[in-house]
Image (cartoon, grey):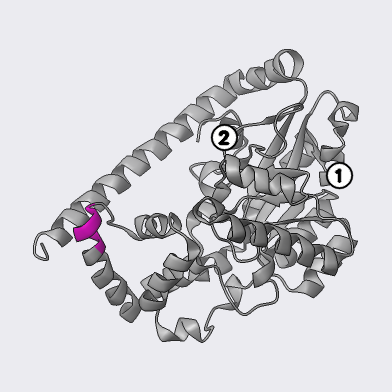
Amino acid sequence: MTVWQPIWQRYWTGWYAMIAKLRRFLRLVAADVLYYLGLLSLWHLVRRKIVRRKEVCILGLHRVLPEEQQNRSNSLDGIVLREATFVKLLHYLSRRFCVLSLDAFLKGETQESDRSKFCCLLTFDDGWRDSYTVVYPWLKTFGLAATVFVTTGLIGAHARIWVEQLVGAWRSSPGHEHLRSWLDTVVQEQGRVTSLEEIIEYLKHMPAEKRQCILRQLLPMQEERHRHDEVDQMLTWDQVIEMSRDGIDFGAHTVTHPLLTYENDMTVEQELRTAKHILEENLGKKVRAFAYPNGDWDDRVRRWVEQTGYECAFTTRQGWYRSGQDPYTIRRIMLHEGNVTGRNRQFSPAMLNLTLAGWD
């Protein structure tokens, strides 16, 4: 097993990378052809005027970083947008969309907006510090509203979400060897885990207590001493309060960021109630919205969200929200560098519109 497994892993990794590049190339070609032939614009026109006039496009983001900081961050590419891309995105949205506040969205004020434009809601998950240092100043520059969903137990703490801890360990030589040794065991047991991304997916789909037991064995001791790069820090309460007073909306994203579908009822209720209480106590205002960690939900978790006093909840299921749909399973379109930029790594209206059309 130990002789042929690395060869098989390298073969599979190379094949997967080639497939990903081909898929990316086909998306770029399709985006340019459909956009410049006017077909995506026609799709928007039909959708706005004829099919679903009451739809709202809810955009989900996580992190926005200058390129230099992105290179030092331990966040996966799928949750990061470069600052230069973000600025062009905001410029595009300010001209083409009516960007709503959370309050306007919950009041159903979409009908009072400019009927020549779609309505849009900007959301940010987790509560990373770049929501204050990068996102917040640009939102003020463009005069746009946004909603930030924070993991309250990480606010002001010298800690990172476990994914960034794991990536940091993987990128260090001792940590990589330790993880690779553990990975060999998992491959023998599961017969499927072959990459860092798959390790992360494997660890996501289990109760938080079980995952923490594994992580305590996997992560180097220096992670337990909170050694981390300032790029991957979370918001402080002073920053949250300042943003809230300046019109940025805040919602809850649990206390410790567990995937709620793998937790028992007591844990689910505690995570929901405590996060809401802590936010309301610090902000001095009612917290009305919730975002499911990793977008994971089921009927049981959905009922708990409603019972604990939230008025709406956001998933990561792709799609647009239409007035009258279930407010506790709101779809979003998650954005990252890979689905809004073109071949030159610059913001691409064609790629954005293709993503908004549902091809991701």
Does residue 157 appear to the left or right of 17 in the view shown? right
Question: Mark 2 — residue?
Answer: 355
Does residue 201 appear to the left or right of 47 in the view shown? left
Element carrying mark 1: helix
Q: Nearer the viewer, residue 340 or 343?
A: 340
Element carrying mark 2: helix
Residue 23 image offset from top left, x and y in percent:
38, 37
Q: Nearer the viewer, residue 161 or 115?
A: 161
Residue 142: mark in rendering: none
From what the image shows, is residue 310 above or below residue 258? above
Q: Residues within 10 Å of mark 1 (few under 14, many from 20)?
A: few
From what the image shows, is residue 248 above or below residue 113? below
From what the image shows, is residue 66 above or below residue 224? above
Amino acid on which disc 1 is placed? Asp
Q: Are marks 2 and 1 in contact (CB under 8 Å)?
A: no
Q: Nearer the viewer, residue 278 or 91?
A: 278
Q: In the figure, residue 159 lies in which quadrant?
A: bottom right
- Asked whether the viewer can see residue 67, the reply is yes
Residue visible at 47% across and 81% down in the picture? 223
Residue segment shown in magenta: 186-191
Discs 2/1, front:
1
Residue 200 image offset from top left, x and y in percent:
41, 59
Q: In the figure, residue 241 lies in which quadrant?
A: bottom right
Amino acid on which disc 2 is placed? Thr
Question: Mark 1 — residue?
Answer: 103
